[in-house]
Amino acid sequence: MTISSTAPSTGTITIPPSVITAAAGKTIDFTSPTVQSALTTLCASLTTNPMVTTSSATNQLTSNLNTLFAGTYKGIWSGTPTSSGTWTVTIDSNGNVTGSTAGSSSTSISGSMLTQLTTGSKYKFVGTAGSSSWAGTLDVSTKVFSGTWTDSGSSGTFTTN
């Protein structure tokens, strides 16, 4: 059994979004006898089916996550003292974030994906919008992109609408 939709002979791991959604919030007990038995079998097979390098696995996972989130997202932002508006960002297949804000303040947005699983199906992103810094998460299950932003003397929130 495998969770990858790519044949093992290709050397790549492709985890379909449906598998990621199905696994959200699930846990595994590595101390259970069933899991221990499966790990023993796996380790015994490694001499004939060696594992890929850590670097290769990390690069493939990063690529899969970036591709999973690629797309355009739109939402609203608000903050103090009295500012609000809309925003649009595009995440490319390399995890780069670009976009713009409109409303009481209009500026360009840039950032990148940290490729770090936070809780369940949420992934972290950070970046800037003009002189503001922002940090947020994108939830794989709901496709909600939300977070906070700060600037000298101002702060607020953003979310998809």
Image (cartoon, helix red, strand yellow):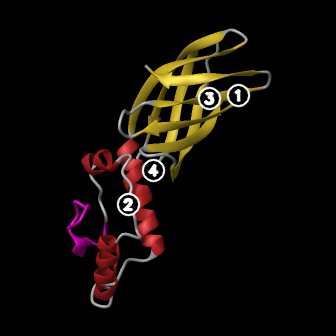
| Amino acid marked by disc 4 | Asn
Q: Residue at point 33% right, 71% down?
A: 35
Q: In the rendered structure, which segment of residues is drawn in magenta?
A: 1-12
The residue where tag 2 is placed is 28
Spatial CA distance of label 2 from label 1 is: 38 Å
Spatial CA distance of label 4 from label 1 is: 25 Å
Judge whether residue 58 can be spotted in this image.
yes
14, above or below 159, in the image: below
Between marks 2 and 1 in the image, the one whose residue lies nearer the viewer: 2
Is residue 113 left or right of 153 when viewed as pictured?
Answer: left
Dots 3, 1 in contact, CB < 8 A: yes
Q: Earlier in the sequence, mark 4 or mark 3?
A: 4
- Residue 148 numbered tag: 3
Spatial CA distance of label 3 from label 1 is: 7 Å
Between marks 3 and 2 in the image, the one whose residue lies nearer the viewer: 2
In what element is the residue under mark 2? loop
Count of numbered labels shown in the rendering: 4
Q: Nearer the viewer, residue 89 or 79?
A: 79
